[in-house]
Amino acid sequence: MTTENSQLKDKLAAYFDEHFDEILADLSEIMSIDSSFGTPSEGKPFGDGSAAALAWGAKKGSELGLNVRNFDNYAVSMTCGEGDPALAILSHLDVVPATPEGWQHPPFACTVDDGYIYGRGAIDDKGPSVAVLWAVKALKELNVPLTKAFRVIFGGNEERGCKDIAYYQTKEPFPPMVFTPDGSFPVLNCEKGMIHLTFSAPFNDFTDANYILTENNVKQWEYTIPSVKSISAGSVINAIPDKCVVTYKSIDERDEETKATVLDDSFMAYLFGDDRMRKIIQEQWDKCAYHEVETYTGKPSHGSRPENGDNAITKFLAAYKGGSELLKALARLFPHGEYDGKSCGLGFSDEISGQMTCALTLLNTDGGRLCGGIDIRFPIDRTVSEISGIITKALENAGFTVDEIESMEPHYVPAESEFVQTLLQVYEDVKGERGEPVAEGGITYVHNTPGAVAFGAEFPWEDNRMHGIDERVSVETFKLNLNMYANAIARLCR
């Protein structure tokens, strides 16, 4: 690190320490706004909350003396300096929904407790957005000389499909360098491809009755494996489900189906009034009544990191002993504890992006059909066409129809590029340790932006409960965010 860079780093760190209470006050303001997706209205394409958050960002940009433009409440851009900007920092002010249930701290407040900042958006992406704004403020107030213009862009729809940035790009082009604080440090330059696939098939689970011979050689019907009536597991396709609720058919429902099957002559005798046999079968039905509802529990995680969770769906499939060929096929394709899709014919990896992931994240019964969803993240040396072809064939062979596929090809920026190397040097100087580029399965805000990378805002080893209850960021990491972004802007725009 040069003397100039070292001196600037120390000045910036002192500035942020001095103004930290003011920084937290700004963070409290933006975190108090519920900017999750709301009902669209005229001039507010993503609802009132998103528009209010963008208005807050625009106000802060104006206070800093930046050239602010609001793009119809899709996004706000704030330009510092004259001429075409060389750099853009892209962040978002919308959040995923949150309700107070289960939270130890209010979701729409900024609570500092035991070294952590709690609240929805603390790490994704309101905390990093405030860090970027204060990085700009620090550079201006410390009169750090910059020769290149740069731009801060806040969007309002990252969590619901990035329609904000698609619209923004029709109005204003991105500069040649773009980074987002929507990923991981040191530098996230490789994002795996993604496939979200849904499938379904007609479903009616009926477990045939079997009989055993009693000591008196009397046939006794066994119904110890109940039939599945409904399954409910998973609410979003990009999260590992922690609960799978299975409802089994009641005795009366089994009775009607059993009568319809007319299993053999002995059972016909029961149907025609054999009271002794009727009593035996009733006893067997009563045996399975306690199976009426069963809940399989696991551990939630992001769909791109299934190894961090415990999939409740595959736990159920592994335990299933019934007669449904569809459920048995899913159990073969998605063994509990397998994360790479090898049993589906996948399981690919490469040197840069590492092992692929494949997770069954949705399984529900609806209108007489068994419906499922799969989250796949695949290496940069593969294509959507190849991966979707393999998984489609596996599902069709199992008796399913693929209903819908959403996909993104992989995103990669060479590690040796000057842009990536500069950010890595900033990371090393601020953090005090050498960093290497990282690859992840998660989709960041710049996945579809050529040449762009993610620079923070979290570290791979942290548990910040992103999108979860009591989302948080440590005070230490938040302060590192402030210093990382200010030093990065200074290096890239000097």
Image (cartoon, grey):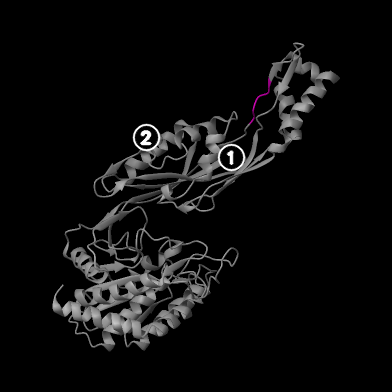
User: x and y percent of residue 174 in the render?
Assistant: 27, 70
Relative vertical location of residue 460 with respect to residue 127 in this rendering, above or below: above
Label 2 sits on a secondary structure element that is loop
Residue found at the very far top of the displayed protein: 217
Relative vertical location of residue 478 with respect to residue 236 in this rendering, above or below: below
Out of 93 and 18, give the one closest to the viewer: 18
Task: Give the residue at mark 1.
Answer: 369
Seen at 80% across and 16% down, the residue is 269
Specify few, some or many for label 1: CA neighbours under 10 Å numbering under 14, 14-19, or 20 or more. some
Bounds of the magenta span?
206-210
Looking at the rendering, which quadrant does residue 73 occupy?
A: bottom left
Q: Give the amino acid type for the residue marked by disc 2 in the picture.
A: Gly
Q: Give the amino acid type for the residue marked by disc 1 in the picture.
A: Arg
Position of the C terminus, as image quadrant, is bottom left
Query: Seen in the image, is 425 located left or right of residue 457?
Result: left
Looking at marks 2 and 1 on the same chain, the residue that comes earlier in the sequence is marked by 2
